[in-house]
């Protein structure tokens, strides 16, 4: 461990369990065993608040993916998991939820160290949110139903449908919500009896390695859940194109999502794509400005803006535009930018030096082409910190408005009336989330229906719950995570007709 990490961990009293988890060599989990894989190559894993190296990640190979898919296939075709009574699958998933809840403090430390996010919200949302999701989806194991049908071919037939698990699921998850997004991918398919291979993000692999140990403790059979590690363009691409995978689920950028969709279609595997976003917040003259400011704190500034559904475009009615900017500015000034392990942290570092440099390109553009209301200055020193920033922009075609910055940068634009607000909000290639802010309920409902987005919130933003489906339209992808709707993506419907 480097002196910088030692000092960082000592300053915030990091537990011995978390220190061991984040500094031990990171390995894969295949067929119930941890393995370094078939290659001696590794990838450095950095800590974002200091920039120091935490550990080395095993660089997976095609042979490792083959082994993981073979393990998942054998577990599905021959193992007990798909044939287990639903109540037993439910019990194991609930046991896993209990174990994650037991180790929530450790997992929050691991996730914060690996990703850089603020530890308080990390425990509440990332870790305990995963517990809630496992319990919700685990409950669906006992509620899968087919249906009888009265067909018109004749009265001497008995027809019905049977719901069956789709098979082996290949999932690829992003670095911005390493544990939580993995749970979004695994809870539903495991509940219905599928088996899985998960490719974790090479920047943030550590929390799911710890969860794999908890899966062993919970009693998950060998081969049901497997983890491969390595670069996405190598290991992830090979996994999503693998003919042994029956269903592909991906969360990440739109650019990579296009390639994943093509790869899945090469062997006709259905695919769920949850991709990028540039979500608008449309606020009318009667909007609760304080509420909007608070929503930006937990949306575009939460997780350092590394959130695909973040409200990154704010359209304020011209009558309250300047007032709204001042209220939001007041909110930003109260937020603390500091290392994620600091219990008072509001905004931690972004994930990497590359991410910081990319965001800073937009800061340069904003200083040249927009009005800087707050922030916009480059941060120096250790770690990958980006100052929360608010720009007032006039041109809706600006890259600041059209492109996903994926950092704590909010752009605000004025509008004159409802029609213009809707046109501006929809003038974007993405369609993941949106929000409407008005005390006029009829207007809010009217605007909601016209916004091109998979999720629309009224007088709130980014309120995500396990019972509500989540997914986008346009360049934000298709298919749903969460909610009852996600279950259907992992079930095959078999039609049965019997002559009487």
Image (tube, rainbow, N blue to C red):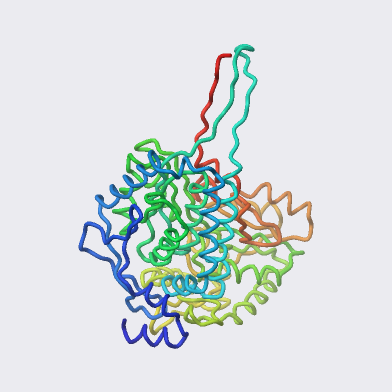
- Residue 310 at x, y = what percent? 56, 62
> At 40% across and 42% down in the image, what residue appears?
76
The quadrant in which the N terminus is found is: bottom left
Report the number of discs: 0
- Residue 283 at x, y = what percent? 69, 62
The vertical placement of 429 against 18, above or below, is above
> At 58% across and 14% down in the image, what residue appears?
500
Given residues 182 and 195, the one toward you in this image is 195
Can residue 453 be seen here?
no
Given residues 179 and 292, the one toward you in this image is 179
- Residue 484 at x, y = what percent? 60, 46
Given residues 205 and 319, the one toward you in this image is 205
Is 266 positioned to the left or the right of 298 in the image? left
Is 38 positioned to the left or the right of 286 in the image? left
The vertical placement of 290 against 282, above or below, is below
Can residue 208 be seen here?
yes
The vertical placement of 353 against 81, above or below, is below
Residue ranking furthest to the left:
40
- Residue 205 at x, y = what percent? 38, 64
Given residues 155 and 236, the one toward you in this image is 155
> At 59% across and 32% down in the image, what residue appears?
146
């Amino acid at each position: 461990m480097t002196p910088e990490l030692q000092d960082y961990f000592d300053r915030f009293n990091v537990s011995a369990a978390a220190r061991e988890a984040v500094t031990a060599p990171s390995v894969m989990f295949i067929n119930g065993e941890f393995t370094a894989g078939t290659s001696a190559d590794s990838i450095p894993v950095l800590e974002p608040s200091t920039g120091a190296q935490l550990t080395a990640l095993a660089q997976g190979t095609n042979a490792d993916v083959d082994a993981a898919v073979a393990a998942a296939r054998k577990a599905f075709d021959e193992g007990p998991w798909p044939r287990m009574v639903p109540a037993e699958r439910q019990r194991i998933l609930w046991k896993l939820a209990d174990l994650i809840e037991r180790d929530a403090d450790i997992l929050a430390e691991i996730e914060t160290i690996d990703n850089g996010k603020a530890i308080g919200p990390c425990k509440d949302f990332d870790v305990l949110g995963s517990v809630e999701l496992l319990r919700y989806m685990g409950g669906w194991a006992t509620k899968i139903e087919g249906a009888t049908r009265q067909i018109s071919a004749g009265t001497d037939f008995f027809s019905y449908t049977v719901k069956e698990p789709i098979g082996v699921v290949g999932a690829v998850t992003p670095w911005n919500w390493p544990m939580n997004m993995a749970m979004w991918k695994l809870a539903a398919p495991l509940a219905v009896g599928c088996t899985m291979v998960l490719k974790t993000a090479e920047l943030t692999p550590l929390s799911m390695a710890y969860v794999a140990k908890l899966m062993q403790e919970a009693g998950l059979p060998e081969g049901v859940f497997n983890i491969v590690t390595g670069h996405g363009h190598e290991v992830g691409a090979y996994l999503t194109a693998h003919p042994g995978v029956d269903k592909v689920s991906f969360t990440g950028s739109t650019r990579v999502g296009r390639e994943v969709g093509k790869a899945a279609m090469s062997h006709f595997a259905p695919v769920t794509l949850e991709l990028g976003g540039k979500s608008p917040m449309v606020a009318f003259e009667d909007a609760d400005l304080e509420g909007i400011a608070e929503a930006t704190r937990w949306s575009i500034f939460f997780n350092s803006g590394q959130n695909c559904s973040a409200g990154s475009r704010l359209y304020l009615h011209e009558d309250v535009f300047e007032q709204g900017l001042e209220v939001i500015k007041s909110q930003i000034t109260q937020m603390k930018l500091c290392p994620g392990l600091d219990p008072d942290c509001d905004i931690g570092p972004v994930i990497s030096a590359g991410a910081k440099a990319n965001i800073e390109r937009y800061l340069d553009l904003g200083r040249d082409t927009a009005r800087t209301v707050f922030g916009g200055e480059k941060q120096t020193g250790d770690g990958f910190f980006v100052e929360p920033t608010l720009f007032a922009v006039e041109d809706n075609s600006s890259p600041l408005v059209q492109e996903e910055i994926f950092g704590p940068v909010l752009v605000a634009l004025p509008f004159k009336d409802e029609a213009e607000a809707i046109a501006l909000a929809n003038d974007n290639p993405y369609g993941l989330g949106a929000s409407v802010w008005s005390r006029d309920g009829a207007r809010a409902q009217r605007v909601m229906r016209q916004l091109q987005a998979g999720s629309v919130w009224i007088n709130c933003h980014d309120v995500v719950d396990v019972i509500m489906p989540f997914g986008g339209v346009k360049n934000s992808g298709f298919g749903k995570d969460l909610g009852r709707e996600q279950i259907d993506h992992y079930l095959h419907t078999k039609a049965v007709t019997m002559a009487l």
